[in-house]
Every structure is written in structure tokens, then in C-alpha cells.
Image: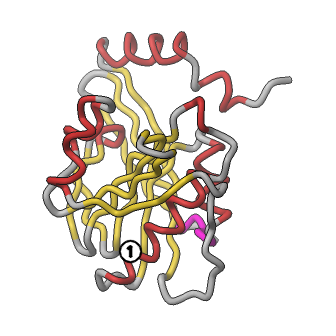
Amino acid sequence: MPALWRLTRTETARRVYETLKSLGITGTQMDEYVTETADDRPSREPDAAIGIRALAPDDARPHEQTYEAFSELRDDEQAICAFDGNDLVGYLFLGDPGLTYHVKPLEKRLHIPGGYIRRVFVDPAARNRGIATALVSRAVAEAENRGADTVHALVARDNRPSQWTFEANGFRVERTRSYYRIGPWNRRSVSESP
């Protein structure tokens, strides 16, 4: 039997989800991954051809021409980017400690006490080269440099590749946030991990 996360990450599944959402039916569960910045951890490096750089918002925004997600980069974040030569092949956004974010799938604003990693992406042609793991590793180091004691990330329960990436960097699930809505009825819950 195929892994459920593979079935839910397809274009067809996305269309079904968007159709249900347009009818007022949504639901999500997200694990909040957390790690301490002071933990001794090996730095994760991608293959030798890849360079990882932290970019300020003004330096990162020109990449919006290639990746639309850069239009979401906030002024209080930086982009951690992976380059293969001059080609941008992966990125994530790292927020400073103590910011508040609107998390669309949860339809809620959340205060994040530490650094916050979001929008992890690696171009499909560049995957399986250690790039995502190296981006997260660099983000943890950058967060520590910016005064964060912890780094947080929200990962959908069906997103196994992202879960593996964070776990490889010493993150653990601290809590699970759930949200369900059918028309005007909604339910939110937060369950702490043992």
C-alpha cells in the first residue's frame, strides 16, 4: 500500500481539498517541531556543488520572478537560500524570535517564541542531494546568531519529507495543532506531545 502522504500531496488531492475549502469545509493537523539552538549538532552540508547563503529581504525579493513565494517574505525575516552555481535551487524563510504569524491552514494567528522556519522548498530537479536538511541546519545556526533559544516549524501531518528533514536536524514534535471547519462550525485543539 502506498504511503498516505504520497496520496495527499498530489495535484488531484490538492484540487479536491480546494473544492471542499470553497464549500466551507476544511481540516488540518500540524505538528509543531522545536529544537534548542544551543544543542550540539553537526552542521549538515549538501553536496559540494551547492552553496547556502542567508539573504536579507531586499536581496532575496528579486527571486520572486522565479519563485512566487518570495512575495510573502516579511521584512523581519531572512531567506536562507541554496544555489547551484548561480541558480537558486532551494530556500526557506526564517523569522526572528518572538514574531506573530497568520498560519493559513489553521486560520489562526500564532505567537512564536523562538525563531520560525517556514516555506521550505527545494526544486524537484535538485532533490535528494541533502539541500533541505542543509537549509534547516543553517537556519538553526542563523536563528542562534539572531538571539533565538529555540527554533520552531509547523509541518502538516501528511508531509513526511519535511518531517524527516526536521527530525534529521534534531527537532522533536512538541505539540499538535488541529483545526476543522464545516460552514460556521469550527473546532480547534492543541495536544502536547508526551
Q: Is residue 75 above or below residue 180?
A: below
According to the picture, the residue beneath numbered tag 1 turns out to be: 142
At x 28%, y 64%, the residue is 95
Q: Is residue 122 above or below residue 44?
A: above
Residue 123 horizontal/vertical position (percent): 51, 34
CA neighbours of label 1 inside 10 A, class few (<14), some (14 to 19), many (20+) = some
User: In this image, 23 relative to 151: left or right?
Assistant: left
Q: Which residue is nearer to you in this view: 123 or 158?
A: 123
Residue 4 horizontal/vertical position (percent): 70, 29
Q: Is residue 132 above or below residue 89?
A: below
At x 24%, y 26%, the residue is 184
Q: What scheme was used to colour the molecule?
A: secondary structure
Asked which secondary structure carries label 1, the reply is: helix
Q: Quadrant of residue 68?
A: top left
Residue 54 horizontal/vertical position (percent): 34, 63
Q: Is most of the magenta stretch helix, strand or loop?
A: strand
Looking at the image, the residue that sits furthest to the right is 1
Q: Quadrant of residue 87?
A: top left
Q: How many marks?
A: 1
Q: Quadrant of residue 70?
A: top left
Q: Which residue is nearer to you in this view: 191 or 124?
A: 124
* Quadrant of the rendering where the N terminus is positioned: top right
At x 31%, y 12%, the residue is 23
* Quadrant of the rendering where the C terminus is positioned: bottom right
Span highlighted in magenta in the image: 170-174
Residue 160 horizontal/vertical position (percent): 65, 43
User: In this image, 14 relative to 78: left or right?
Assistant: right
Which residue type does callout 1 highlight? Answer: Glu
173 in magenta: yes
143 in magenta: no
